């Protein structure tokens, strides 16, 4: 055994530059009674540390543990670990020759790798939080209606009183693209712009929007709409403020903020009427809100009973002819009748908020988990349209206004609004972002994980928070 230990010492006494000898503590003094698993573990750890194993991401280390092959270091994009991979394979050969590659030894190495993965993940999270807290918010000095595109551009549409052109009503004479990474603003002449309910296709190449009496589509690329190739879909002249995509069947649902009215076939452009008059859900209360569930042909509807202070939620499949088929029974939600839906772009999570509460709703079971519950005797409220979800649906951001102010009141330092961060899986608050003395509304997520807020009573300022 002493011969083997000496060989290990000679083989692994070189660092990554392969020129400078390094003493490996304890090897020279090992006796025949030493546990081989201890010898292998110490050498493995020293190799790992000296040759860059701690530069591997947590998910790669976790995959290594799952493979149950601790010596097979995977190739990782952007990480030059050739020497580590080579030395680990040499090490494995010597451990095999010594008869030390036992289940006990491998279990020991895998356990220590698991601990390493958790350590790397924790360090990455701490670094992310530190960057968030240290970075300063960005103020955009351009105004108008703001839209966040899938490619990360913040699209700003300036208002105009010009006459309608082509599809829908022209409410803008210029549109602007703000690149949140470079800060560059680009302006481009435009023929017409959308008014309400603008959403994008999953690939980000097509935008759908509504005007006073039309639903239209227009191609999108690199910060701008190709208005010349826009076209109207064939529907009724009814007013619509909200849209939702049913991606599996290539359809678009349009309606008011309270309930859906039509479903469009995006291939033919033809619309079918959605009749909600006979729904059992609407016998429990008045239509309150709705949302399409991303990646499905299903929508959520809610009905409010103001007298009882109840909110009921039901899930429905939208049929080819616009018929609604219930999926399971409707459920009563522990929130006021003013609850609003906020669906995660990637699916899997839905937020419901009113002025005093925010909770998550599982779109499969319709079960809920409370996040925010403000006391009725507090002035504090959840800001108007004051919640959003991260793209993966794992984090909820809720805008909290600590005091209700009148029109002529002035905010004090202690009255600043804040964004509270919640872990959707646990319901626990994980962070708070204090805002300024302005009033803010409409938080939306940028694709890189930052928040975009608008300042109330301002036509020019948008704030991006880290």
Image (spheres, grey):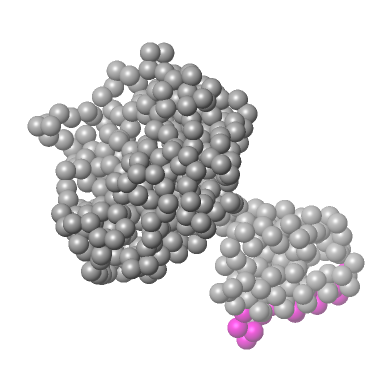
In the image, residue 77 sits, relative to residue 200, either above or below, namely: below
In the image, residue 140 sits, relative to residue 352, either above or below, namely: below
Q: Is residue 271 visible?
A: yes
In the image, taking residue 170 as reference, residue 43 lies left or right, namely right
- Which is nearer the eye, 297 or 110? 297
Residue 12 shown in magenta = yes
How many numbered marks does the figure carry? 0
Residue 278 shown in magenta = no
**Image point (22%, 28%), residue name:** 404
Where in the figure is residue 326, as x and y percent of width and height? 59, 31
* Highlighted range, magenta: 1-19
State the image quarter where residue 159 is shown. Answer: bottom left
Report the residue that reaches farthest toward the left: 408
- Which is nearer the eye, 439 or 302? 302
- The quadrant in which the C terminus is found is bottom left
In the image, residue 100 sits, relative to residue 462, either above or below, namely: below
In the image, residue 394 sits, relative to residue 164, either above or below, namely: above
Where in the figure is residue 246, as x and y percent of width and height? 53, 48
In the image, taking residue 270 as reference, residue 354 lies left or right, namely left
State the image quarter where residue 3 is shown. Answer: bottom right
- Which is nearer the eye, 295 or 105? 295
**Image point (12%, 34%), residue name:** 410
Where in the figure is residue 108, as x and y percent of width and height? 76, 55
- The quadrant in which the N terminus is found is bottom right
Report the residue that reaches farthest toward the top: 307
Where in the figure is residue 360, as x and y percent of width and height? 49, 34
State the image quarter where residue 383 is shown. Answer: top left
**Image point (56%, 25%), residue name:** 330
Q: Is residue 42 visible?
A: no
């Amino acid at each position: 055994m002493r011969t083997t230990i000496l060989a290990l010492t000679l083989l692994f006494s070189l660092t990554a530059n392969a020129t400078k000898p390094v003493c490996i503590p304890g090897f020279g003094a090992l006796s025949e009674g030493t546990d081989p698993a201890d010898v292998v573990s110490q050498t493995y750890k020293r190799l790992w540390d000296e040759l860059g194993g701690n530069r591997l991401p947590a998910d790669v280390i976790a995959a290594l543990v799952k493979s149950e092959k601790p010596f097979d270091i995977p190739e990782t994009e952007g990480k030059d670990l050739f020497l580590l991979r080579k030395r680990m394979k040499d090490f494995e050969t010597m451990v095999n020759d010594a008869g030390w590659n036992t289940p006990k030894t491998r279990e020991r190495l895998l356990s220590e790798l698991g601990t390493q993965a958790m350590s790397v993940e924790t360090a990455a999270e701490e670094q992310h939080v530190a960057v968030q807290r240290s970075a300063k918010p960005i103020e955009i000095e351009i105004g108008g209606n703001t839209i966040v595109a899938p490619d990360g551009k913040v699209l700003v549409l300036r208002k105009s009183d010009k006459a309608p052109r082509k599809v829908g009503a022209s409410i803008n004479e210029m549109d602007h693209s703000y690149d949140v990474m470079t800060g560059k603003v680009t302006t481009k002449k435009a023929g017409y712009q959308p008014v309400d309910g603008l959403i994008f296709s999953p690939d980000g190449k097509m935008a759908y929007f509504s005007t006073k009496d039309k639903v239209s589509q227009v191609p999108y690329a690199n910060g701008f709409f190709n208005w010349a190739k826009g076209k109207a879909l064939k529907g009724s002249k009814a007013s619509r403020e909200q849209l939702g995509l049913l991606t599996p069947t290539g359809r678009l649902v349009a309606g008011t903020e309270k309930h859906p009215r039509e479903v469009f076939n995006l291939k033919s452009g033809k619309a079918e009427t959605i009749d909600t008059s006979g729904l059992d859900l609407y016998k429990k209360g008045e239509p309150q809100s709705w949302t399409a569930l991303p990646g499905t042909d299903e929508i959520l509807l809610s009905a409010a009973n103001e007298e009882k202070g109840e909110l009921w939620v039901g899930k429905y499949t939208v049929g080819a002819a616009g018929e609604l088929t219930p999926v399971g029974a409707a459920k009563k939600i522990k929130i006021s009748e003013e609850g609003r839906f906020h669906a995660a772009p990637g699916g899997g999570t839905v937020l419901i908020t009113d002025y005093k509460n925010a909770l998550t709703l599982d779109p499969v079971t319709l079960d809920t988990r409370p996040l925010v519950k403000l006391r009725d005797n507090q002035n504090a409220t959840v800001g108007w349209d004051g919640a959003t979800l991260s793209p993966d649906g794992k984090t909820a951001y809720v805008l909290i206004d600590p005091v209700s102010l009148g029109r002529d009141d002035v905010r004090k330092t202690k009255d600043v609004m804040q964004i509270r961060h919640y872990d959707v899986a646990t319901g626990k608050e994980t962070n708070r972002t204090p805002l300024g003395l302005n009033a803010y509304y409409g938080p939306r997520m940028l694709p890189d994980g930052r928040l975009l807020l608008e300042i109330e009573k301002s036509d020019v300022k948008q704030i991006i928070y880290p």
